Structure formats: C-alpha cells, structure tokens
Image (cartoon, rainbow, N blue to C red):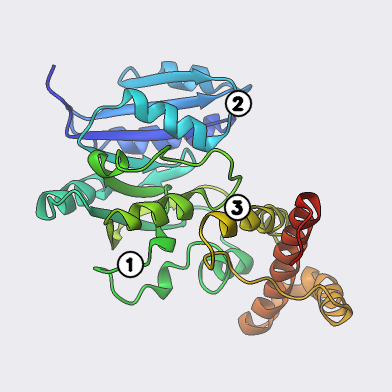
C-alpha cells in the first residue's frame, strides 16, 4: 500500500457527540487516500459506538494518559507525509483539508507548517465572554497575527495545524506529556529551533464546538498558570508574566467577580476588563501554587 500523503490525528476523551460532528465534517472533504487515526484516551461515554460508525478511522484504545500521550501514540501508527492535527471538538469547515494540502504543495520544504483559524461555531450561542476570549482574551489571539507568512510559534494550535512528518521527527516526543497546558506552544518552540516556518490561513476554518464561561476560564487559567512554571524551566522567557497577588489585585478581582453576573449587559470594553482581571488572577494563583509545590519563589 502506498504511503498516504495526509494523516489526520485526533485525540479524544468523553466527547462522543462532538467527535461525531468532527468526523462527519472531516470525511465530507477528505481524499480517499488519507489516513485518519483517533486515539481514544479512556473514554467512558459512547465514543466507541461513534468510532465504529466510521469505517475509515484507525482507532487506538488508550487508558487515559492525556491528550499529549494520545497524540504521540497516534503519530506512531500514522504514516502520511503531512500530519494534520485536529481536536475532537473542532468541525472542519468546507475547504479546510484542501487548504492545508494546497499549502504544502506550494511550500514543499520540510520546515513549512500551516495553522488555520479556530473560532466559535456560529450555529451555537456565542456570548460576549467567548468573543472576548479569542479577541483580546487568553485563547488563540489569531487576530494579533500581523504577517500570515511569518507567524510566531506561540500561535501554533493543534486544534487545526498541519506539519510535515519529517519535521516532527526532528524533535523528541514530539509532545511533552508532563505539561498539562502549553503543549502546543512548547512543541512549536522546539520545532522553531529546528527550522519550522509557520504560516497562517484565516480561510482554513475550524469551528470550535465548546462553550466557555468566566468560571470555566478561571479553572483553565489556573492550570495554565501551574503549567507556566514548567514551561519557563524548559524555555526561559516564554511563559507569560504573572500579575501580583497583593491586596490591590485581590480587591480588583473581588470587584470583577461581583460584576460578572451583569457583564454581558455592559459595554464590551468594560466587560473585557472585568474578565481580564479574573483571568489574570487565576493565572497568577496557579503559577504561585505550582511554585509553592515545587519549593520555588516567584
């Protein structure tokens, strides 16, 4: 059997309905020769039933080692020259696969990689908080990309990114299973060290099926803060700076939480400052927690 030009790698855990939507959209545009590998990371819902409905999927059954370990495992059995990473809660809009393939046809060098836009699913309710998250908040910040042909590796997003297999083989792992967050960024920094040139295509669109709230953002940012300590050890200067946890900041976040219930009614600029205060506090608290655990000083 000839080596497929494209391998799609998707880690999944307990998102059966999102995974069905992801695979349905993917197979509507996938070349017959493409390979799709889904690493089922210990799901306890009806994920297996969903996977059995897609005969073209190669399934790895894992025991819950996390998304990075799942991606690494899937890479060991996928063989395509080009690897397209998708998340299980991302729907590939029409043309996404072709745009990734066309990019690599036009940019055949091993170092060329492409990240596509990940944005909220417009068929679902999008809150002001979610708009802020990706446009001024701590999510993907694709709107800050100034040059689509020369993209900072910190925009590397495995929800919708394609890389030559040969480039991935230049680094160990490739995903660092010790990091609970920053896994995309940490890999991208190592890939950049071996020559990766990242481009961005705003028309290779993946719709994100999840919904976020201020509370879920706080939870995520706390874990991001914890992970930033290890990221800083691996790549000094790359972890975002943390705000002070002094009494002034404490008072600000207290006010922000009090205002949160009415934020969706406030002007976007004011609401954004409220959500930013909460996210900054959660990140700093997570970073401080990890430093205490590791016996370090901030």
Quarter holding the N terminus is top left
**For this view, does 128 lie left or right of residue 173?**
right
Q: Pointer 1: what residue? A: 151
Distance from disc 2 to disc 3, alpha carbons, whole Å, reads: 23 Å
In the foreground, 125 or 23: 23
Secondary structure beneath label 3? loop
Q: Is residue 121 visible?
A: no
**Can you say whether 38 is above or below 188 in the image?**
above
**In the image, which is nearer the foreground, mark 2 or mark 3?**
2
**Can you say whether 269 is above or below 128 in the image?**
below
Q: Mark 3 or mark 1, which is nearer the start of the sequence? A: 1
Quarter holding the C terminus is bottom right
Distance from disc 2 to disc 1, alpha carbons, whole Å, reads: 33 Å
**For this view, does 46 lie left or right of residue 295?**
left
**For this view, does 97 lie left or right of residue 171?**
left
Q: Position of residue 39 (x, y in %)?
A: 46, 26
Secondary structure beneath label 2? loop
**For this view, does 132 lie left or right of residue 266?**
left
**In the image, which is nearer the foreground, mark 1 or mark 3?**
1
Distance from disc 1 to disc 3, alpha carbons, whole Å, reads: 27 Å
Instruction: Give the number of the disc on residue 64.
Output: 2
């Amino acid at each position: 059997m000839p080596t497929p030009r494209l391998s799609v790698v998707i880690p999944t855990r307990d998102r059966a309905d999102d995974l069905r939507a992801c695979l349905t959209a993917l197979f509507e545009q996938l070349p017959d020769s493409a390979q799709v590998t889904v690493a089922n990371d210990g799901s306890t819902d009806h994920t297996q039933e969903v996977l059995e409905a897609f005969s073209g999927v190669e399934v790895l059954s894992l025991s819950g080692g996390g998304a990075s370990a799942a991606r690494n495992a899937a890479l060991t059995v996928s063989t395509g020259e080009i690897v397209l990473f998708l998340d299980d809660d991302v729907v590939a809009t029409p043309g996404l696969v072709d745009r990734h393939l066309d990019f690599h046809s036009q940019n055949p060098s091993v170092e060329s990689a492409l990240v596509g836009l990940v944005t909220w699913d417009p068929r679902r309710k999008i809150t002001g908080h979610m708009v802020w998250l990706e446009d001024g908040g701590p999510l993907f910040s694709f709107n800050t990309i100034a040059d689509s042909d020369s993209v900072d590796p910190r925009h590397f997003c495995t929800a919708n990114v394609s890389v030559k297999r040969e480039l991935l083989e230049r680094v160990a792992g490739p995903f660092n299973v010790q990091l609970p967050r920053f896994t995309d960024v940490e890999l991208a920094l190592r890939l950049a060290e071996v020559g990766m040139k990242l481009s961005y295509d705003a028309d290779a669109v993946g719709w994100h099926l999840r919904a976020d709230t201020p509370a879920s953002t706080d939870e995520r940012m706390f874990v991001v803060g914890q992970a930033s300590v290890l990221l800083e050890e691996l790549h000094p200067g790359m972890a975002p700076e943390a705000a002070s946890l002094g009494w002034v900041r404490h008072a600000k976040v207290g006010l922000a939480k009090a205002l949160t219930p009415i934020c969706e009614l406030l002007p976007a600029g004011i609401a954004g400052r409220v959500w930013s205060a909460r996210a900054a506090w959660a990140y700093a608290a997570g970073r401080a927690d990890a430093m205490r655990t590791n016996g370090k000083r901030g």
